[in-house]
Amino acid sequence: MSYLPCELHCHSVHSDGAFQVKDLLNTAKDDHLALIALTDHNTMSGHSELDDSILPSIKGIEWTTFYGHMLVLGAKEFVDWRDAVPNNIDEKIKQVKAVGGLVGIAHPFQIGAPVCTGGRWEFNVKNWGNVDYMEIWHEDFNRISMENTKAVDLWSSLLDKGHKIAITYGRDWHRIETSGHYGCTYVDIDGEVNQQNAIRAIRMGKTVASTGAKFFFRLHRNGNTYAIGETVKKGTYTFSFFTDVHSREKNSGAEEVEYKTIKVLTNGQKVVLETRYDERHVRLKFEKNSWYRAELWGTVDGKSYPLAITSPVYCE
């Protein structure tokens, strides 16, 4: 399999969603998603209703606290979220990791109190090495959101410090929407589409956050091929881009979208290469102690935005 559209942040009637679990699965299947994660607020009670014969899924939970929301995927045991406070979050994350859980930061810059108490990430993480991924985009793309811009900046600053953190897009799916432009996370799932393989791919950093277009790359050097999320040595690499701007067009909004360029960014979000959006192959020299990610850029109603962002590759 190669970069399948997934939704990793979903809710049901077991918390504040409108979906019965079966209806969520069928709606996601009708939406041509390959996999979802059920992440109800502070409960796993809906897990018994998940049915992989309808659609493969990940059993998750959204820790919903006064200090931020944390997505926990695939934990083999329950870890109590109720005593999580800013200064013990590293220990709580360690407990999640000990039972096989994947840890993600949900919408870190969502508007906080008094509108949505706890929606903004205010935990004092010291060991970012135990955080697997971050939601850099969330909800719909019909409005310009500084929340998303700040999330990308936070993630990039962590990459600059040497942390290897994957990215996702979170629809934060609660109900059937009648309008809006909704993206997905493309996950490079190797083998059967199931919880185990999806979690493995996310943990390895094989993800792309997208407004819809399918966009990813592979690297080639000296007869070897490398994928997003991998660590490589210093040298010159050929990027092979795959870009399908028509993927998931049915989920676009009323905006006029035009694809323009591909950018490759490195430390400090410095653009080190820019080429046409339909370019297939480019060469770039990688420097030591750097990360490299690709972004698909275009205009939305005439204004320039990133429309897909990959997780990085890393140069040791």
Image: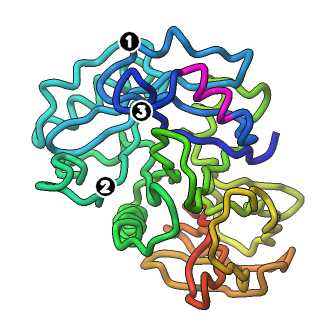
Q: Say whether residue 313 is visible.
A: no
| Sequence-first disc among 1 and 2 | 1
Residue 180: image tag:
none
Q: Position of residue 155 (x, y in %)?
A: 40, 62
Circle 1: residue type = Glu
Report the disc number at residue 77.
1
The residue at which mark 3 appears reads as 17
Say if residue 258 shows up in the picture. Answer: yes
- Counting residues from the start of the chain, the first of labels 3 and 1 encountered is 3
Neighbourhood count class around disc 1 (C-alpha, 10 Å): few under 14, some 14–19, many 20 upward: few
Q: Residue 214 vs residue 292: left or right?
A: right
Placement of the N terminus among the 4 image quadrants: top right
Q: Of circles 3 and 2, which is in front?
A: 3
165 displayed left or right of 69: right
Question: Secondary structure under badge 2?
Answer: loop
Residue 108: assigned label: 2
C-alpha distance separating marks 3 and 2: 20 Å
